[in-house]
Amino acid sequence: MMLTAVGLMSGTSLDGVDVALIETDGRRVNALGPSGYRPYTDTERGLLRQALYEAADLADRAARPGCLREAERVVTSAHAEAVAAFTAQHRMRFDDIDIVGFHGQTVLHRPEKKLTVQIGDAQMLAKTIHIPVMYDFRAADVEAGGQGAPFVPVYHRALAQSLEWEGPTVVVNIGGVANITYIDGDTLIACDTGPGNALLDDHMFRRMNQRFDTEGRTAALGRVDAAWINRALEMPFFSLPPPKSLDRNDFAGLKLGDMPPEDGAATLTAFTVAAIARVVPLLPKEPKNWIVAGGGARNLTMLRMLRECLAPATVRAADTLGWASDAIEAQAFGFLAARGLKGLPLSYPATTGVPLPMTGGIIARP
């Protein structure tokens, strides 16, 4: 039976809440509906940055010390507003929607400690929007020994099935963290590759008081410090085989020094690209096609660097295929909610390292 699902996503780049509607039976995508976006205000974003800092030493995933309780309230309220605006804009009733997939905001991801923390009150959200909400997608995977990320590969596979391309295809999602899904027939492999936009966004905010490098314009003016990138790539993470995942803050110790802001932007953009390319030798076959989604797909300098680094493979932005690049992760959590309702696996040994295919998610009812 086809379900109408709405997926919600607030990613590691802390920009806002993405909303997307999808019609699916949890196995295939019947139709993609509209998408929407509710940006965080500067005050909200500042609170979330502080929450990331204060969550660093959490040992109990239910604890909300310091500003975390207020941050959870803000996250919940922003998601409720996003759903209300989305349904109003598209003249939908709450009972038109079967399930909402609510990822929440990740503030800590430490799978080696069997710990992943996403803030957001799903029960309050369900009562506010009057729709059943599925949440806490990652916890069961991490508890079973998986990496708890990435979780979008099953959706990437469902999208890629319609392309009917020959040879291996990789979908690379460049959000705060970058991750890949390798698809070759029945083979599905996934992992985080390293920083996506998080380091670059932080640099742009700190040095130029801008939220991100629009279209990669700042990076286009700078010079890449190849020696810095080579040193950064010596971190053990980059030589680990998939599956593997990381936290947004795992690269916080990397410092650019006093290089000009344009050079810093160019170097961090190239670092993201080099980290993605480092995964190629760890895959069964060299990919023939790359599809770039997420915020990085709008960074023209990053796309150019990817094409140069991954040649002779073809590199396409997801939007050129009719995919809504900015909405893919939100769509994915609508898809995962549908899978969760039907008891289908959300993660696999080759995507998160979990011992067996794992279901997941908890339902909060209005």
Image (cartoon, grey):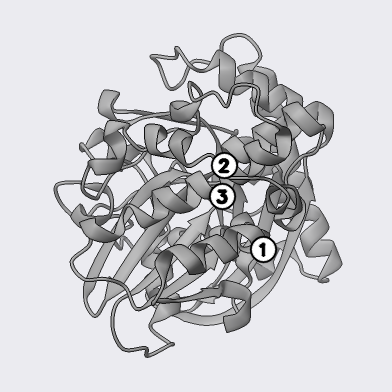
2 or 3: tag closer to the N-terminus: 3
Query: Residue 245 occupies which quadrant of the picture?
Result: top left
Return the residue nearer the eye: 62 or 245.
245
The CA span between labels 2 and 3 is: 17 Å
2 or 1: tag closer to the N-terminus: 2
Query: Residue 158 occupies which quadrant of the picture?
Result: bottom left
The residue located at (43%, 87%) in the rendering is 162
Mark 2 Cα-neighbour bin, 10 Å: few <14, some 14–19, many ≥20? many
In the rendered structure, the answer to whether residue 320 lies left or right of residue 241 reads right
Q: Which mark is residue 175?
A: 3
| Image height of 359 relative to 146, above or below | below
Which amino acid lies under the numbered mark 2 shown in the image of this protein?
Thr
Q: Which mark is residue 267?
A: 2
| Image height of 167 relative to 51, above or below | below
Which amino acid lies under the numbered mark 1 shown in the image of this protein?
Leu
Mark 1 Cα-neighbour bin, 10 Å: few <14, some 14–19, many ≥20? some
In the rendered structure, the answer to whether residue 332 lies left or right of residue 246 reads right
The residue located at (67%, 54%) in the rendering is 18
Q: SS class of the residue under badge 2?
A: helix
Count of labels shown? 3
The residue under label 1 is 300
Q: Nearer the viewer, mark 2 or mark 3?
A: 2
- Asked whether residue 335 is in view, the answer is no
Q: SS class of the residue under badge 1?
A: helix
The residue located at (73%, 27%) in the rendering is 206
Mark 3 Cα-neighbour bin, 10 Å: few <14, some 14–19, many ≥20? many
The CA span between labels 2 and 1 is: 15 Å
Q: Nearer the viewer, mark 1 or mark 3?
A: 1
Which amino acid lies under the numbered mark 3 shown in the image of this protein?
Gly
Location of the N terminus by quadrant is bottom left
